[in-house]
Image (cartoon, rainbow, N blue to C red):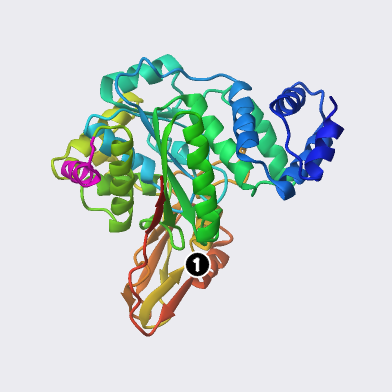
């Protein structure tokens, strides 16, 4: 068997056998198959695709390329959540405490954020003293003791995916549905939760730009999850404007706390309650989604969800609690963005806002970039809100920035207005079972 044979087969639209996929991944990780050869194969896959069995085999090889985490000693049905990424996407910090507060173990291992905003780990590390570096034993013990842990992935989870993703990124072969699905699910299955809710974003600030693409990816992910005997479902949700009002790290932690207090943005609360109610049904904690939704709402009203958030951050070393975090100062207020005309906000381009936040220091382009935890953007107005010319619509936080004028102009370009009232945009578009 030779890698050139596999390239030739896939180039002509033929299926790769399980043995050929094993040969390819094993040889690539061992250094016996070179980057340029795998690049050619990836390009053939990009244009010809993988069938359901090939996608399963690739996912299995990526899982087996490194360690797997056995969470069977965690009591109860363990749940996890994955988002395909967006702007202001603070859902894990709200969803985890919500479901844990009704007695469903939330066991999440995350990777680092890369791009226009920080990831969940970067947001947690904005909390002074908090450590995301838990051993597997510590992770399991914490979930058993308080029902929740959010930590970094161990170093050797799916190394095959890490190496393959770097090459896909360099060769412009990232956006193939089967390759995306195998990358996402290999990590989640290797970590070992029983039920998984997928938040597949679509729109301006998302990887998937059309509902059709998001639908295709969701179906691929759900089918693949079922083939590994996992309870999986997906929600397709809009990312045409940032989720919530905060974009950054500490600023998003503070927003998550306000949601858990019942005082946060309604779109972020609605999404977390919907994701939570569906994953509780997947985990067989509730048979009825409406009952699960009401139970989660009750944890906000009675304060149990906020208590669970405090338990989580205390267990991982935080030097303060939710109340202290709300009092913590962000980076200096650099500017307020003022509305340019009377009317209603008609669009807020999520990607442009996220990129502006990154330039302020809230995200990174490379893993070596240093994040400013207190940098970010706070949107005082969302799509559909009425505004008057000269009224503040956003606040910008960060350290002194030579590009500030350019950042302000980019935020202005991201926002448009209408003289007519704009209906509230739909957040949850579809579900895939």
- State whether residue 53 is above or below residue 210: above
Asked whether residue 283 is in view, the answer is yes
Give the x, y percent position of residue 428.
37, 57
Task: Identify which residue, 175 or 218, lies in the foreground.
Answer: 218
Q: Is residue 384 left or right of residue 135?
A: left
Residue to which mark 1 is pinned: 411
Q: How many marks?
A: 1
Q: Secondary structure at mark 1?
A: helix
Relative height, residue 13 to residue 63 (above, below): below
Q: Position of residue 68 (x, y in %)?
A: 52, 20
**Which residues lie in the magenta part?**
286-298
Please give left or right for residue 79 compared with residue 30 in the image. Answer: left
Nearest the eye: 54 or 422: 54
* Residue 345 in which image quadrant: bottom left
The residue positioned farthest toward the left in the image shown: 302
* Magenta stretch, overall SS: helix
* Residue 168 vs residue 132, the one in the foreground: 168
Residue at the outermost bottom position: 419
Answer with the quarter of the image where residue 168 lies.
Answer: top right
Quadrant of image for the C terminus: top left
Q: Nearer the viewer, residue 222 or 267?
A: 222
In this rendering, would 280 be left or right of 330?
left
Residue 114 x/y as whole percent: 57, 44
Determine whether, in the image, residue 269 is placed left or right of residue 398.
Answer: left
Pointer 1 local density, CA inside 10 Å: few below 14, some 14–19, many at least 20: many
């Amino acid at each position: 068997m030779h890698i050139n044979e596999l390239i030739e087969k896939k180039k002509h639209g033929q299926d790769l056998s399980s043995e050929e996929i094993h040969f390819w991944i094993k040889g690539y990780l061992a250094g016996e198959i070179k980057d340029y050869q795998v690049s050619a194969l990836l390009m053939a896959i990009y244009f010809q695709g993988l069938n359901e069995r090939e996608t399963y085999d690739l996912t299995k090889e990526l899982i087996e390329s490194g360690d797997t985490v056995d969470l069977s000693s965690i009591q109860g049905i363990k749940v996890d959540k994955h988002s395909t990424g967006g702007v202001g996407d603070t859902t894990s910090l709200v969803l985890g405490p919500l479901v844990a507060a009704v007695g469903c173990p939330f066991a999440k291992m995350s990777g680092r954020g890369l791009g226009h905003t920080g990831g969940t780990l970067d947001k947690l590390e904005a909390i002074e003293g908090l450590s995301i570096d838990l051993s597997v034993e510590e992770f399991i013990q914490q979930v058993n003791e308080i029902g929740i842990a959010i930590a970094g992935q161990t170093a050797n989870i799916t190394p095959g995916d890490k190496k393959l993703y770097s090459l896909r990124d360099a060769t412009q072969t990232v956006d193939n549905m089967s390759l995306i699905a195998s990358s996402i699910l290999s990590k989640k299955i290797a970590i070992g939760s029983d039920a998984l809710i997928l938040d597949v974003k679509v729109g301006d600030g998302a990887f998937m730009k059309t509902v059709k693409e998001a639908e295709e990816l969701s179906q691929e992910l759900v089918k693949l999850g079922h083939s590994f005997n996992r309870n999986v479902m997906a929600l397709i949700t809009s990312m045409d404007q940032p989720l919530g009002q905060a974009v950054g790290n500490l600023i998003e932690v503070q927003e998550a706390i306000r949601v858990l207090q019942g005082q946060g943005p309604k779109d972020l609360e609605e999404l977390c309650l919907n994701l939570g109610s569906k994953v509780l049904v997947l985990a067989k904690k509730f048979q009825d989604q409406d009952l699960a939704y009401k139970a989660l709402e009750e944890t906000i009203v009675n304060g149990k969800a906020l208590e669970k958030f405090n338990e989580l951050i205390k267990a991982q070393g935080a030097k303060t609690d939710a109340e202290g975090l709300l009092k913590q100062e962000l980076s200096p207020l650099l500017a307020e963005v003022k509305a340019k005309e009377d009317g209603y906000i008609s669009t807020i381009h999520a990607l442009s806002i996220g990129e502006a936040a990154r330039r302020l220091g809230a995200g990174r382009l490379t893993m070596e970039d240093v994040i400013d935890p207190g940098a970010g953007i706070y949107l005082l107005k969302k799509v559909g809100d009425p505004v008057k010319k000269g009224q503040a619509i956003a606040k910008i936080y960060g350290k002194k920035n030579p590009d500030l004028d350019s950042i302000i102009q980019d935020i202005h370009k991201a926002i448009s207005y209408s003289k007519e009232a704009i209906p509230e945009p739909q957040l949850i578009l579809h579900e895939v079972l």
